[in-house]
Image: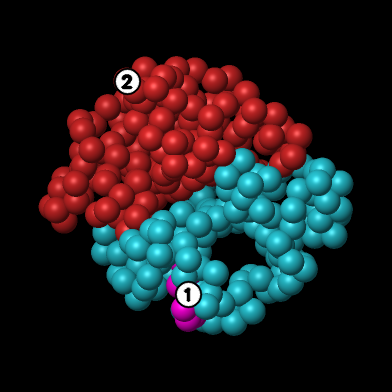
Chain colours: A cyan, B red
Amino acid sequence: MKLGRLNHIGVATPSIADSVAYYREVMGATSITEAFDLPEQGVKVCFVDTPGHDGTAGTQVELIEPLGPDSTLAGFLAKNPLGGQHHVCFEVPDIEAARAHFEGLGKRILGPTRIGAHGTPIFFLHPRDMMGQLTEIMETPKGAH
Amino acid sequence: MKLGRLNHIGVATPSIADSVAYYREVMGATSITEAFDLPEQGVKVCFVDTPGHDGTAGTQVELIEPLGPDSTLAGFLAKNPLGGQHHVCFEVPDIEAARAHFEGLGKRILGPTRIGAHGTPIFFLHPRDMMGQLTEIMETPKGAH
C-alpha cells in the first residue's frame, strides 16, 4: 500500500453550529458544507474546506457532533468537553485491497466496510494498533483527481 | 483573516523511530524527512510527506517526540502512552497580522512568536480558546506557492 492523500481530519465538537461559527469568525473559513446526519455512525457531520497548494482543494476538517447520548462520540466528548481531534482519514484507490493489507498486518478493523460521509466505502482501524490514532481509510471519490 | 493551508498535523509519539517504521511499513509512506531537535520546544521532529491533489504536496504529518522528561510533550504522552494527535497547524501569509487578529479576539497565545520546524515564524494558541485544539499558526515559507 502507498500512503494516500490526507482527505480530512475528524474533529469532535459538542455543537456543529458553534464550530461553524468558530471556523468562520476565528479561523476565517469561507467554504463550509451544510451539516447532515450519518445515523449509521451516530453522528452529524459537515466539512470545512481548506485551500491546498496551487488552487487545489486541501485536507478538509470534518466536524462531527454526536446524534444522541448513545453515540460512541458521546464518550469522547465526556472526556474532552470542548471537543478536539478525533481521527485522521487517508484515501486509497481500492478499499478492498486496503482492507486486505491491514488485515494481513493483524490490524483490528472496526466493523464492516461501509459508505462514509463522501459517499465512498470506508472503514476504521483501532487506535491501539495505529500508534494511538483512530484511522479512517476511504476510497478516493471517482473523478476527484 | 482567511483560513490558510493546513500545513501539518502534529502527532505525538514516544519514539520517532517506531513511528517512521509504522508510516513506512503500515501506511506506505515513501517520503519522510530526517529527524532533528527543536530544543526551544523540547522536542525532536520529523515530517511524513503526504500527496495532495494533482501532484502537489499535501498536508504533512509532523512526528514529535519529547527530548526529555521536562518536555511539555511528556505530559501528553503520560496520558496517551501510544502517542496520538497533538496539534494542527495552519499557514498564514503574515504572522504579525495573524497574531494581532487572534489577540484582538482575546485568544490566549502561548509565548512569543518564534521560528518553527519549517524555519518560518510560528506561534501556538491555547486549546481551551480554540474548541479543544492546540493550534499552531505558521507563516507560509517563501516560495512555497
Rounded to the nearest angstrom, the CA distance separating label 2 from label 1 is: 39 Å
Queried whether the magenta region covers residue B91, the answer comes back as no
| Front one among B44 and A110 | A110
**Disc 2: which chain?**
B
Amino acid type, residue under disc 1 in the picture: Pro
Range shown magenta: A63-69
Q: Quadrant of residue A12?
A: bottom left
User: In which quadrant of the rendered image does the C terminus of chain A lie?
Assistant: bottom right
Answer left or right for A47 relative to A125: left
**Which chain letter matches label 1?**
A
Residue A67 higher or lower than A106, as above or below:
below
Front residue of this view, candidates B133 and B4: B133
In the rendered image, the vertical position of residue B99 relative to residue A18, given as above or below: above
How many numbered discs? 2
**Residue depicted at 61% across the width and 74% down the height:** A41
On residue B40, the disc is 2
Give, as a three-letter code, the residue at label 2. Glu
Q: Position of residue B98 (x, y in %)?
A: 24, 45
Q: Secondary structure at mark 2?
A: helix
With respect to residue B5, does B124 lie above or below?
above
Task: Write down the residue under mark 1.
Answer: A66
Discs 2 and 1 share one subunit:
no
Residue at 54% x, 82% y is A37
